[in-house]
Amino acid sequence: MPTESTNKEAMPARVRDLPTWLLGRAAAHSHRLLAAGFAEAGAHGYHYRLLAALEEFGPASQAALGRHAGIDRSDVVAALNELAGLGHIRRTPDPTDRRRNIVSITPAGLRQLSRLDGVLARVQERVLAPLPEADRGPFLAALSRLAAGQEPPGAPGAP
Amino acid sequence: MPTESTNKEAMPARVRDLPTWLLGRAAAHSHRLLAAGFAEAGAHGYHYRLLAALEEFGPASQAALGRHAGIDRSDVVAALNELAGLGHIRRTPDPTDRRRNIVSITPAGLRQLSRLDGVLARVQERVLAPLPEADRGPFLAALSRLAAGQEPPGAPGAP
DNA sequence: AAGGTATCGTTGGCGCGGCCAATGTTGGTT
DNA sequence: AACCAACATTGGCCGCGCCAACGATACCTT
């Protein structure tokens, strides 16, 4: 595994300790591990999200699926094509609405999903490894707040 | 500003709370703010990193610059072209090594850099806004460890 | 002195993840 | 009947991170 970007030769101080920089680096690192794990299982990030959404919410139209997985309609098409090619999902025309495809997960898809679940779990552990158990809860809680981009006190937003 | 990806319609539980997912989301959010801020100033991420490295380490060859900024040689070329077009940097042939260009930051580049510093500072504040002051230190410390991908106890690495 | 090796700048390409716009079809409202 | 909204699909764009190859130049051996 070559990838190790940031050839340590001292980043500018202005950048090195920026929260946004650290966030980016940490995310990049976790993404690398994730991608590597998925690649071994012959999957991509979108695949897992789609399979997970299918398993959890049951068969759905592509649009609904995209909404659940946070993936753009157009990207859903491509990913589903790949998943269909692998036999992990099936597209069925919706009899009640001819605009829609009903997408459902196949047994093979379910097997792949649980394989990926395993990969995922292992990666989570590796990513959090640098953190002592005790620190993880608070860290993840903080991370959630950042991820939501919400403000705790009086938040000025869209009234 | 349209971009708001994840149209909240419930992510799969399998994904929603994954550390890697939260990391990705938080980083994406911060990246969006960053990109927006930079865009207003007519800059890209690479531009800031390069200007910062130049200001901090002084004139350098493109290769060295790339190493300091964590940017691939080839991407340095493109970014420097843009910066040169804006008059923010200057390329001078190195008299002692004709393979090299000596890249230096111009007064205009310095002005741009401090403008971007302002943008950066504001973005940091917005990103951390959801976190009460007291939580930020520990959070950032944890984030640093994750970013480094280091393990705290006995770390197996390159002896 | 000559040869091989390493570095430098540059070009061109790839991948992932996230977006947007346009098209043709179909459904629901009015 | 006319309109507008939602659907699947195509095709394109961007940022960021990589990698391979090239010709030119420098450095280090033998």
Image: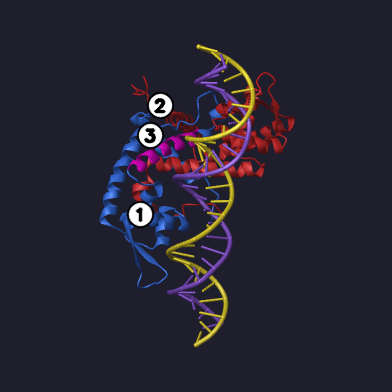
Chain colours: A red, B blue, C yellow, D purple
**Residue range corresponding to the magenta coloring:** B22-40
**Residue holding disc 2:** A150
Whichever of labels 1 and 3 marks the residue nearer the N terminus, that label is 1
Q: Are marks 1 and 2 in contact (CB under 8 Å)?
A: no
Q: Are marks 1 and 2 in one subunit? A: no
Quarter of the figure that contains the N terminus of chain B: top left
The one of B56 and A73 positioned closer to us in this rendering: A73
C5 relative to B70 in the view: left or right = right
Res A125 visible? yes
What chain is tagged by disc 1?
A: B
Q: Residue at x 55, y 50 (%)?
A: B156
**Residue holding disc 3:** B127
Q: Residue B62 at what x, y percent from top left? A: 40, 61
Q: Residue B81 at what x, y percent from top left? A: 39, 57
Number of the label disc, if any, that sits on residue A80: none
Q: Are marks 3 and 2 in contact (CB under 8 Å)?
A: no
Q: Residue at x 50, y 27 (%)?
A: B7
- Label 3 secondary element: helix
- Label 1 secondary element: helix
- Label 2 secondary element: loop
* Amino acid under disc 1: Leu
The residue carrying pointer 1 sits among few (fewer than 14), some (14 to 19) or many (20 or more) residues within 10 Å by Cα, namely many
Q: Are marks 3 and 2 in one subunit? A: no
In the image, is residue B75 above or below residue B124?
below
Gap between marks 1 and 2, in whole Å?
35 Å
Gap between marks 1 and 3, in whole Å?
27 Å
* Amino acid under disc 3: Val
**Residue holding disc 1:** B83
* Amino acid under disc 2: Gln
Q: Residue at x 40, y 26 (%)?
A: A150
Res B151 visible? no
